Image (spheres, rainbow, N blue to C red):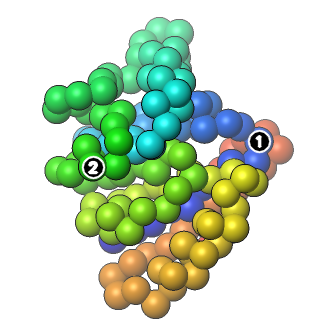
Amino acid sequence: MRVDFYHLTALPIARALPVIADKVLASGQKLAVVADDEDLLGQLDEALWTYRADSFLPHGREGDQPILLCAPEGAKGYPFIALADGVWRDAALGHERAFHFFDETSIQAAREAWKSLKDRDGVERHYWKQDEDGRWKDLT
């Protein structure tokens, strides 16, 4: 399984997540976006509606959705999971691919998660950081 660590330095999660979610949907996969913070899930809900002027990314807060915004326990059955609140959860390892978003407030916890996954069998880690224009660079 693959774990992508996304270090948010130029754009906030509400602007970065829709880009990744759009790519996930384009690949034919489904994505669970996980956070314990209801306010954050509300912001992401709005961001997915307004991501592009000509369309929106299909999503919802319950049921079988292409993009499901949920608490951690709601992500079961989704092949891809995005940890949107900066909190690493080992339950993400039960998915095909995990996207762990974090910023400067949660960087130490992300470093610890990165280290803890180093010797895990079957785990491929990637570290992505934004450049000054908000483009992602794989620094693995």
Q: Amino acid at mark 2?
A: Glu
Task: Provide the secondary structure element on which disc 2 rests.
Answer: helix
Alpha carbons under labels 1 and 2: distance apart? 30 Å
Residue 99 horizontal/vertical position (percent): 46, 55
Q: Is residue 35 above or below residue 113?
A: above
- In terms of sequence position, does the residue under pointer 1 or pointer 2 come before the other? 1
Residue bearing mark 1: 10
Residue shown at 35% from the left, 87% from the top:
121
Residue 27 horizontal/vertical position (percent): 32, 44
Residue shown at 57% from the left, 81% from the top:
115
| Quarter of the rendering containing residue 63 | top left
Q: Is residue 107 above or below residue 119?
A: above
Residue 115 in sight here: yes
Left or right for 119, reference 104: left
Q: Is residue 22 above or below residue 52?
A: below
Q: Is residue 117 above or below residue 19?
A: below
Q: Amino acid at mark 1?
A: Ala
Out of 108 and 58, give the one closest to the viewer.
108
Q: Which mark is residue 73?
A: 2
Out of 102 and 134, give the one closest to the viewer.
102
Residue 18 in sight here: no
Mark 1 or mark 2, whichever is nearer to me: 2
Residue shown at 52% from the left, 56% from the top:
87
Out of 24 and 68, give the one closest to the viewer.
68
Task: Provide the secondary structure element on which disc 1 rests.
Answer: loop
Residue 76 horizontal/vertical position (percent): 21, 51
Quarter placement of the C terminus: bottom right
